[in-house]
Image (cartoon, rainbow, N blue to C red):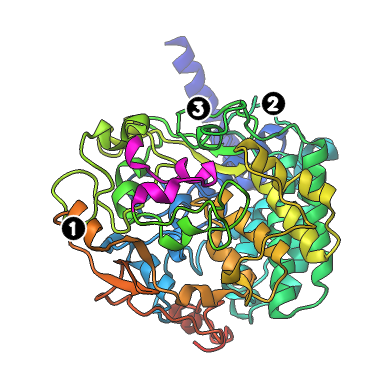
Amino acid sequence: MRNNLAYSLFSLAVLLFAGCNDDFLQRLPLDEISNETFWNTENDLMVYNNSLYNLARDDNNVPILMGHDDGFDSHRYGIWYLDEFTDNIAPRHSRHTRYQQVRSGKHVVPGGTQWYGYRGWNFVRAINVGMDNYDRAQIADEVKNKYVGEARLFRGWFYADKVSKFGDAPWVDRELNVDSEELYASRTPREEVMSHVLEDLNFAATHLPDDWGDGGGPGRINRWAALLIKSRVCLFEGTWRKYHGGSNPEIWLQEAASAAKELMDDGPYELYVTGDPQNDYHAIHHIREDLTGVPEVMYWRRYELGIFTNHVQSYHRGYNGGATKSMVEDYLCTDGQPITTSSLYEGDATIEDVFMNRDPRLRQTILHPDDVSRWGYNNFDTREYPRLRGMDGGQRIETGYHIIKVYDPLSAHATYNTSETPAITLRFGEALLNYAEAMAELGTITQADVDVSINLLRDRVGMPHLDINNVPVDPRYVDDGVSPLIVEIRRERRVELFMEGFRYDDLRRWKQGKKLETPDYGIRFDDAAQARYAGANVAFSEVDGVPYVDIYKGTDWENPVFDESKHYLWPIPTSAISQNTNIQQNPGW
């Protein structure tokens, strides 16, 4: 009672004081957070940047820190699905139609924003609000710059994604209001945007801490991760300028190589290796709930029941359609030669033959019929695999090549939308590939460079080293316009990073869109296969006189096209152009 009375008297005094003091009306409420009172301490900056991580969890709107989107949307938005834009994976489910449209070149100018598209600009606004206020904090510049670096990393990364898809992009580096002239400006030219991007990434790679003290958990992005992101972005830009035209591609390639090499030489990360070549590649992808402390995993997203969950395991198995014939055929034989030149290749008369004498990553990525129990596939199913669409029971797919790289039986059969399957966003293996490719594109690569990059990946799975003085020549790639060494580095990238979201960007930056004009095929489907897979309801076509499952035959996605004049970039939605007529549509659209 006494406390209540005291509070009432105090309140009355305040009201009386306010009545005779006009200045009081300008004072800020003591019980609310406002922009004027917030930006004071390190904790304030940390809390604000937490909101940026929260926005970045929306993979569709902010497709950079890719993981599995939250809840129901995790069945179609996320890192595992991005390869469906390409010749790696062949989905046919209606919920993945967008992937099929883009893969086949049948996408059109959208009325509004579409998946991973011209959207997410509120993320830039949130970053710029922080950028306009961080300096108000009364803390040391060294501390403040950690959070400035975090925000600038996100901004540079976000813009790099927009430039990769749309070319020119509206660069904004301050908070806008309804009267800001930038709202109605033209898009900023690509090379100008990318110069800003590089400034942001350099600041982040300089000022972010080596370690946030999170013990390798799914916390904040550190300086080493910023170097990996920088190497990725610079490799894209350098190769884009080299193959599509642009100024100073070698500067970007050197930045990519230098960032990757700094991470490789000085960072605390390494490949996950236990000396078991038949399992080590698959191990970090054989999903568990907690990846803390795994030496190769640089950044990952945690999911926890009741807070943030997904159902990628239960949906991905059927929705992805399976790996393609093209993907499977790119795995080398155990002599280090491609299937086109190796005497060890057993052919594909049966699916078992496909796995004979091949890079161990193939059997750690695609289901061998003998490994159903090993991986606990389809809840330790006892049926014969593979199983194609139309067969009776079991997990059926389109191509016959079931993907087990990320398969976990416990999560796959969890109750709807309660999976805690984590997502690996950044891993050290990519740095090795970025370094090797950048050095090769610069034309300065040495055997020592290959030994500390590509050959470490091959050592993990017991494959022969790549010898730059004795590189195999695969006749399938002689028309690509690049050296056999670059062909092999690109092959290594495709195999190592399968289903981790790189293939579509890689084909576009290499100017290899023509590869998407080849129809997607699955397993061999001759008379013996038709008897073995009784009941399968699939179409097939002959390739060099041999019948294979033809995934999209008879569908809208049959006969894929790739228009070199327009398909390397995506179209701007008409809704964006109608709101700002100074935005010009991309060429060809």
Which residue is identified by label 2?
213
Is the Cβ of the residue at disc 3 closer than 8 Å to that at disc 1?
A: no
Q: Earlier in the sequence, mark 2 or mark 1?
A: 2
Identify the residue shown where x is 35% and y is 41%: 313
- Residue found farthest to the top: 2
Q: Is residue 542 above or below residue 123?
A: below
Give the structural element (helix, strand or loop) at label 2.
loop
Q: Earlier in the sequence, mark 2 or mark 3?
A: 2
Quarter holding residue 162? bottom right
Q: Nearer the viewer, mark 3 or mark 1?
A: 1
The amino acid sitting under disc 2 is: Gly
Mark 3 nearby-residue class (10 Å; few <14, some 14–19, many ≥20):
some
Q: Report, in whole angstroms, how far the alpha carbon at label 2 lies from the one at label 3.
A: 17 Å
Q: Is residue 267 above or below residue 446?
A: above
Q: Report, in whole angstroms, how far the alpha carbon at label 2 lies from the one at label 1.
A: 54 Å
Which residue is identified by label 3?
290
Give the structural element (helix, strand or loop) at label 3.
loop
Q: Percent from the top left, x then y, of residue 189?
A: 70, 78
Would residue 126 be seen by someone viewing this image from the given angle? no
Left or right: residue 262 compared with residue 365:
right
Q: Percent from the top left, x then y, of residue 75?
A: 34, 50
Left or right: residue 469 compared with residue 110:
right
Q: Which residues are magenta?
A: 350-370
Which residue is identified by label 1?
536
Q: Earlier in the sequence, mark 3 or mark 1?
A: 3
Is the Cβ of the residue at disc 2 closer than 8 Å to that at disc 1?
A: no
